[in-house]
Amino acid sequence: MKKYKFVFLCYIVLSTLLLFSLWVSNKEQCLETFNINSKSETEITNELIIALFIETITNDITSYYSEYYLGKIEVYNYEVNIVNIEKNEPGLISIKFGITPQIGAHNPLGYDELTYSVDSRGNKSLIAYEHLKNYKSAKSIAIPCPVNTNGNFLRPPY
């Protein structure tokens, strides 16, 4: 009988330690939420699309700016908007996002537009990256804005 009490006590102690470690590790994470002011179906749909793309957008933005800036670049969902969505070919949807990446919380680097192609399986690929504007807070960072024949700033498509 004493053996079972000891095993049960060990089980309780280990379970408590496991739950405590999970609680501590989850407490350190910051979970962004959706905009509580979104009411219409369009606003909610746009938020959902941005949430599904935010990791890909962040990786592509970080990759672009890493050539010019070594610090951490933040992409916040409220600094991303959908510029255009259209069907270009059968089975493919093109979606263009406008993004203002940040250094920290309130220091915008520039304004970029990223265009992705999405197939019917949800596979997405970056087809165009346009760096359109540098902001004053980023003056110390030399980010070129090449101009194409239309007068728009453009980075060659991937």
Image (cartoon, helix red, strand yellow):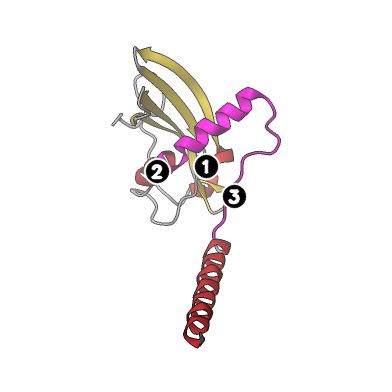
User: Is residue 61 rendered magenta in the image?
Assistant: no
Asked if the residue under mark 1 is in contact with the one under mark 2, i.e. CB atoms within 8 Å, the reply is no
Residue 54 x/y as whole percent? 47, 40
Residue tagged 1 = 135
Q: Which mark is residue 143?
A: 2
- Give the SS element for disc 2: loop
State the residue lying farthest toward the bottom. Answer: 2
Q: CA distance from mark 2 to mark 3?
A: 19 Å
Three-letter amino acid code at the position of disc 3: His
Q: Which residue is located at x 36 percent, y 49 percent?
A: 66
Count residues near mark 2 (Cα–Cα under 10 Å), then give few for <14, some for 14-19, many for 20+. some
User: Which callout, 2 or 1, points at the residue further toward the start of the chain?
Assistant: 1
Q: Quadrant of residue 41?
A: top right
Badge 1 crowding class, 10 Å Cα cut-off, few under 14, some 14 to 19, many 20 or more, is few
Q: Nearer the viewer, residue 103 or 58?
A: 58
Q: Report the amino acid beneath label 1.
A: Tyr
